[in-house]
Amino acid sequence: MAAWSNRRMWAVVGAGHGGQALAAYLALKGENVSLYNRTPGRLEGIRRRGGIQLEGVVRGFARLALATSDLEEALDGATIIMVVVPASAHSELATAMAPYLQSGQVVILNPGRTLGALVFAHRLREAGASPDVTVAETETFIFASRYIESGRSMIQGIKRRVRVAALPAMRTASVVHLVRPILPQFVAVGSVLETGLSNIGAIFHPAPTLLSVSRVEGESEFDHYREGISPAVARALETLDAERLEVARSFRVRVLSAKAWLASVYGSVGETLHKAIQNTPAYAGLKAPSSLDHRYVFEDVPTSLVPLADLARVTGRPAKLTEALIVLAGAVTGIDWQARGRTLASVGLGDLDVHEIREYVAVGFRTPHRRHASGPARLGSFAEPAAEAVRAEVYGARAEVYGADDLLETEATS
């Protein structure tokens, strides 16, 4: 892997709710930041103002090095590329970025949802990108933020801990070392299976929307979390979450339950998931979708539920509620989400078993294996020491940074 420059240069791809806020935040930290958006209109206010006015828990006027709709210009010379676009756009974006990526650059998906880094890296390989480009992903976006207009964003809260992993896992420690001086919230975890299966959006976004479809298509606004997640809906979410946790156990991945995640990130507690959600101030006033044409369906079903169901299939323990929600989403939208969604087959890993997938995300390539007449493929013995060394390195890095608490942080920057 190529050595990185001591001088960080950031490129933020996407100028929406998250991207514009992140670009401003990094610039207020004194970093050299370029911001890219495919449509120039999103950048007009930034150019007119000369920067981005950041409001909320972080305040200040941020001047960027560049705001552009030229992807090559935005990526040129960047050390770290923060991708902040809907996960459903990752595949197309990877193909577009491939010709301009340079050896040693780091691409971080914020967040990757489930199988995100695998999809992005697969598309880069298909498009002939340098093999020395590292792809990493976070489990969640660092901010609760809102796009007000071009050149104005609000950060309502900053998560204290954002789990991140690289593909392969042997590069995670280097990625975290690179970003933590500016984003100390980023902590290393074992692999992209851990970040992908920590995708809480899979639990909190599509199911409440689909189970409240008549209200979503109605005339009156309502709160997604406080009203859309009733006690009965919350019980369904607990069943859905149990399926996610079972998949994680099968892959020997440590993830938090949805209820524990709320306590970890927001300090919200309750006897049940419903009560914990009701006790989360950050969710107050967040409106439910006003139609099914919303990222809670069009992003979260294909990039969260479909891959979760596929990973469950590999374990031999089908995720029945997950599968049912995919079918329901197809019935109400008229779209075959299973065909459109992320699967292991779509990233060239459809023939691997649980053990082989774990080894792939650790070392980044298919290791030689032998076929047993009575069972699926297994790795050859030489791969085991290498994979164990990778795991020891990554888990050592985790131990150094896992001491911080997880309460929501507020911060003021002038």
Image (cartoon, rainbow, N blue to C red):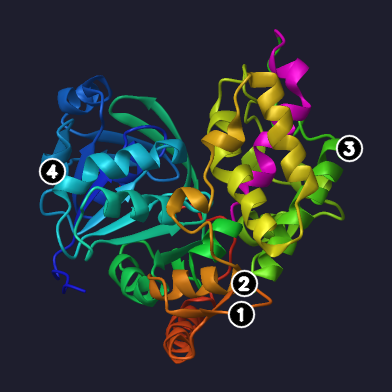
Left or right: residue 280 versus residue 340 is right
| Quarter residue 247 falls in | bottom right
Please state which amino acid type lies under the numbered disc 4.
Answer: Ala
Report which residue position mark 4 lands on: 65
* Contact between labelled residues 1 and 4, with CB atoms less than 8 Å apart: no
| Quarter residue 59 falls in | top left
Few, some or many C-alpha atoms within 10 Å of disc 2 (few <14, some 14-19, many ≥20)? few
* Gap between marks 4 and 1 measured at Cα: 57 Å
* Gap between marks 4 and 3 measured at Cα: 50 Å
* Contact between labelled residues 1 and 2, with CB atoms less than 8 Å apart: yes
Element marked by disc 1: loop
Element marked by disc 4: loop
Report which residue position mark 2 lands on: 376
Q: Which mark is residue 372?
A: 1
* Gap between marks 2 and 1 measured at Cα: 6 Å
At horizontal 40% and vertical 39% (from top left) the residue drawn is 18
Magenta region, residue range: 198-219
Label located before the other in sequence (1 or 3): 3
Report which residue position mark 3 lands on: 232
Label located before the other in sequence (4 or 2): 4
Can residue 199 be seen? yes
Element marked by disc 2: loop
